[in-house]
Image (cartoon, helix red, strand yellow):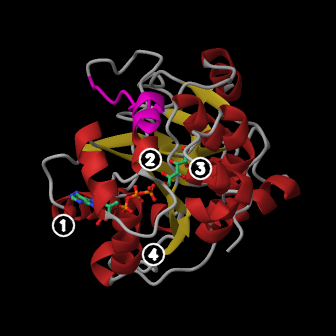
Amino acid sequence: MRVPRIIHGWIHRSKPPPNDFRCNIVRGCAARRGQLVDCFLLTEKKNKNLVSCDGINSIIILFKYQFWHPKALFQSLHWFAIMDPHQLPHIFIIAGPSATGKSTVARAIAESFGISMVEGDDLHPQENIDKMSEGHPLTDEDRWDWLKAVASVSVERASLPTSPPSELCGEHPGSPACITTCSALKRKYRNLLRSQLPELETAVLRFLFLTASEEELLRRIEERDNHFMKKGMVRSQIVTAEVPNTSEQDENCEDVEKDCTVIWTDNLSQDEVVEQALEIVKQLMLSSTSNECLDGEGAGDEAFAEDEN
Ligand SMILES: Nc1ncnc2c1ncn2[C@@H]1O[C@H](COP(=O)(O)OP(=O)(O)OP(=O)(O)O)[C@@H](O)[C@H]1O
Ligand SMILES: O=C(O)[C@H](O)[C@@H](O)[C@H](O)[C@H](O)CO
């Protein structure tokens, strides 16, 4: 399934609508910048399906078109085709420094949930692999095109149908999804991935960032055979890594990355990490709409008022 992009008239409102606000809306859910959000199709006020907005914490108005406008109708039909949260594509990026267990975890998730896996290392150009094999850390410049390739292949794979077990999707057919390994060490790399996924307006993106101490990574790399990444690279991986800030206390700080979950793997066995990761992915795939409203460009309250009239 290729997901249609939603386009017209995004208006964003970060505060709850007034309690007495009533309009003609159809409630659904969608993804906006990789996060699942409640959304509403605003239609003409005259229509009989008036719904109260009481209790709604956030609102995204999809269209300023009147509902009968053929273009709007056509688009809204598309839109409703993907409104079911179980149908939104999910992209899970397993991130973190070398030897934190990304491939191990991703393989287990892909297998358990019947979703496709993208091995980020396979997308490095040969020069990057050669460079790392010779013990030289990559630079930002070396990573840029690789990150773009990771994004584009992930989107493509996330469009493929999946056959997850019924516990994951109940009677629903299950979201198309993809699990990708990609170090995404720095915040700006994660931002690049976020921004490189235009389809994320209609997909859910999550990072699962694995990390461990330098000693533990050295130990794992020493035990691992046949890998281009050798011990000498661990230091630079640790120094480069910017572990995402996911603290709830810092919720309103600019640097918080709400779409990330961090797992410190030092004191966890491989199986325990896999178990935690499976649970996180399962919860995300099962979660329905979140009432979180994202900051965005949008006209805000005034535009809302304009629609109200
Ligand atoms: N939690 C863990 N405890 C102990 N060993 C682990 C753990 N997770 C993974 N390993 C082992 O560490 C090694 C590295 O794991 P893996 O290849 O999955 O990491 P990676 O992050 O994908 O590495 P790279 O990015 O370098 O390809 C493997 O030998 C794996 O069996
Ligand atoms: O950004 C990077 O420095 C690289 O992606 C590395 O992290 C390796 O590709 C990976 O970890 C394999 O060992």
- Residue at 47 percent across and 75 percent down: it is 115
Instruction: Look at the numbered disc 1 and give the secondary structure of its residue.
Output: helix
For the residue pair 9 and 124, the one nearer the viewer reads as 124
Give the residue pinned by disc 2.
Answer: 207
**Placement of the N terminus among the 4 image quadrants:** bottom right
Estimate the spatial distance between the alpha carbons at disc 1 and disc 2, rounded to whole Å. 19 Å
Give the residue pinned by disc 4.
Answer: 174
Q: Residues within 10 Å of mark 1 (few under 14, many from 20)?
A: few
Q: Which circle's residue, 4 or 3, is located before the other in the chain?
A: 3
Of tags 1 and 4, the one toward the viewer is 1
Estimate the spatial distance between the alpha carbons at disc 3 and disc 2, rounded to whole Å. 29 Å
Q: Which circle's residue, 3 or 2, is located before the other in the chain?
A: 3
Q: Are marks 3 and 2 in contact (CB under 8 Å)?
A: no
Q: Are marks 1 and 4 in contact (CB under 8 Å)?
A: no
Height in image: 182 above or below 11?
A: below
Total residue callouts: 4
In the figure, is residue 273 to the left or right of 304? left
Q: Are marks 4 and 3 in contact (CB under 8 Å)?
A: no
Of tags 3 and 2, the one toward the viewer is 3
For the residue pair 270 and 39, the one nearer the viewer reads as 270
Instruction: Look at the numbered disc 2 and give the secondary structure of its residue.
Output: strand
Q: Which circle's residue, 2 or 4, is located before the other in the chain?
A: 4
Estimate the spatial distance between the alpha carbons at disc 1 and disc 3, rounded to whole Å. 32 Å
Q: Residues within 10 Å of mark 3 (few under 14, many from 20)?
A: some
